[in-house]
Image (cartoon, rainbow, N blue to C red):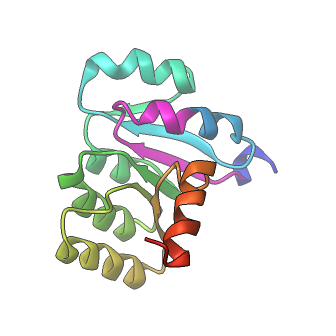
Amino acid sequence: MAEKDTPRIGILGGGGILGAHAPWLKKYSNMARVVAVAEPRPDMASRIRGFFGDGIHLYRDYSELLSNETLDAVDILLPHHLHMPAAVAAAQHGCHILVEKAMARNVYECDRMIEACEKAGVSLTVCHDRRYHGEWMALKTIVDSGAL
């Protein structure tokens, strides 16, 4: 896939969990490219550039990133209270959304996120990076069996 055809990804939030997402985003950069990160703390810039290189566009606010970048999707790694407003804004900009767990703080916020994505015709996926780890799969098998 040519670079110009590769889906463009924006990351909203450059805190601790970025360390879990960045290696995979970097490993599969031939399938989707991270082009911009929104992180309000300027002291995180060198860490972010360490993951994605000097060419990454950095923004202090996710709204600014969404307004200035042409994106196909966003990875929302913000504090939980920002998941809903960021997801609604991203959907309004036509971005598919991966949001870190917890999806939102309550059912009301989850419903607003779902509604915004349905209205925009974009996908919404909640990330739980341990979903397919052996221990978690074994626990799910036990729970599904009715033993617990």
Residue 130 relative to residue 101: left or right: right
Q: Residue 19: in sight, yes or no?
A: yes
Residue 111 relative to residue 16: left or right: left
User: What residue lies at 18% left-to-right and 77% top-to-bottom?
Assistant: 108
Up the image or down, 7 lies above or below 37; here it is below
Which is nearer the eye, 95 or 134?
134
Q: Where is residue 100 in the image (x, y as percent from the top left)?
A: 39, 52
Residue 129 among those drawn in magenta: no
Stretch in magenta: 6-22
Q: Residue 123: in sight, yes or no?
A: no
Residue 141 relative to residue 93: left or right: right
**Snapshot quadrant of residue 78:** top left
Q: Position of residue 18 (x, y in %)?
A: 44, 34
User: What residue lies at 41% left-to-right and 83% top-to-bottom?
Assistant: 118
Q: Position of residue 9 (x, y in %)?
A: 53, 49
Up the image or down, 145 lies above or below 67; here it is below
Up the image or down, 111 lies above or below 28; here it is below
Q: Where is residue 89 in the image (x, y as percent from the top left)?
A: 30, 63
**Snapshot quadrant of residue 52:** top right
User: What residue lies at 52% left-to-right and 59% top-to-bottom?
Assistant: 139
Q: Which quarter shows the C terminus?
A: bottom left
Residue 10 among those drawn in magenta: yes
Up the image or down, 20 lies above or below 116; here it is above
